[in-house]
């Protein structure tokens, strides 16, 4: 998979959120009203009725018909004032979107692609990083399904997982692009394990023909720096209104 293929797939993926093709956009601000913004997103558990994606060249504001009248009133403003106004009214969450550029880490230490047989190690890891979580009834199925596809990587230290990249369900283009979440035991952070694990996750996904994808809260500087250290670069900022049932 070439860097051009990765860029194309990543842009196609974010185009689904914006309901407009992003690869050939000219400089400017675009407003897109789409019923797709009223659909619950697989793997997210909520709707994104307002989704704004901005980079140094262009800005796209995509929104549900329910918010059309109010959002389109913001066309009178420049993009920064528009984003600020919508963010203030709807309490938008800001995320940093990353694009995989090149492999910057080629030595993976004790990181490996996890097999379904390693579920007991993963369950033990999960219980440590999510002490309030309840794995009963879902974790085994989730892990074995994804591990069978080669989507889980982990760093093993003395037969214990200390860092893991998981693979949540994707709302669009599943099987073509895959997000890689990363968790590391608190006492094992800042030792390079997360970088090795995340780098191997990206490397293996590319090997099997799947585009790696990374995004995180814009306030999560550690996650942004980790992504950059293994070969991602900044693609843009997303401002998102999450709408939950009830």
Image: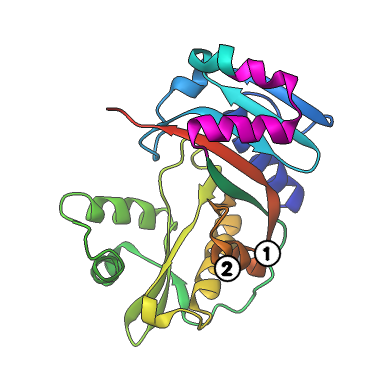
How many marks can you see? 2
For residue 41, side relative to residue 17 (left or right): left
Q: Is residue 161 above or below residue 36?
A: below
Q: Is residue 202 above or below residue 40?
A: below
**Residue under pointer 2:** 199
Which residue is pictured at 64% across the width and 27% down the height? 61
For residue 37, side relative to residue 43 (left or right): right
For residue 212, side relative to residue 4 (left or right): left
Q: In the image shown, does 88 or 69 lie closer to the viewer?
A: 88
Which residue is pictured at 55% across the width and 73% down the height? 195
Q: Is residue 195 visible?
A: yes
Give the percent coordinates (x, y) of residue 235. 70, 48
Q: Please tell me which of labels 1 and 2 falls first in the chain.
A: 2
Give the percent coordinates (x, y) of residue 55. 73, 42
* Residue 195, label in figure: none
Which residue is pictured at 38% across the width and 33% down the height? 46
Q: In the image shown, does 180 or 69 lie closer to the viewer?
A: 69
Give the percent coordinates (x, y) of residue 103. 68, 66
């Amino acid at each position: 998979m070439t860097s051009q293929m990765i860029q194309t797939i990543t842009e196609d993926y974010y185009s689904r959120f914006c309901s407009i093709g992003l690869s050939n956009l000219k400089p400017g601000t675009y407003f897109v009203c789409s019923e797709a913004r009223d659909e619950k997103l697989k793997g997210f558990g909520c709707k994104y009725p307002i989704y704004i994606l901005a980079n140094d060249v262009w800005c796209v504001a995509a929104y549900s018909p329910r918010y059309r009248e109010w959002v389109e009133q913001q066309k009178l403003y420049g993009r920064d004032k528009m984003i600020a106004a919508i963010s203030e009214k709807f309490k938008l969450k800001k995320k940093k979107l990353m694009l995989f550029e090149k492999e910057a880490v080629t030595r993976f230490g004790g990181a490996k692609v996890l097999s379904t047989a390693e579920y007991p190690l993963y369950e033990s890891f999960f219980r440590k990083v999510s002490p309030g979580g309840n794995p009963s009834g879902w974790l085994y199925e989730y892990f074995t399904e994804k591990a069978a596809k080669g989507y889980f990587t982990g760093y093993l230290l003395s037969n214990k997982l200390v860092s893991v990249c998981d693979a949540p369900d994707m709302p669009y283009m599943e099987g073509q692009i895959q997000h890689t979440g990363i968790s590391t035991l608190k006492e094992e952070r800042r030792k390079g394990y997360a970088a090795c694990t995340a780098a191997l996750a990206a490397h293996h996904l590319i090997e099997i023909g799947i585009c790696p994808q990374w995004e995180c809260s814009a306030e999560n500087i550690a996650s942004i720096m980790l992504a950059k250290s293994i070969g991602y670069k900044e693609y843009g900022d997303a401002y998102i209104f999450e709408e939950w049932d009830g």
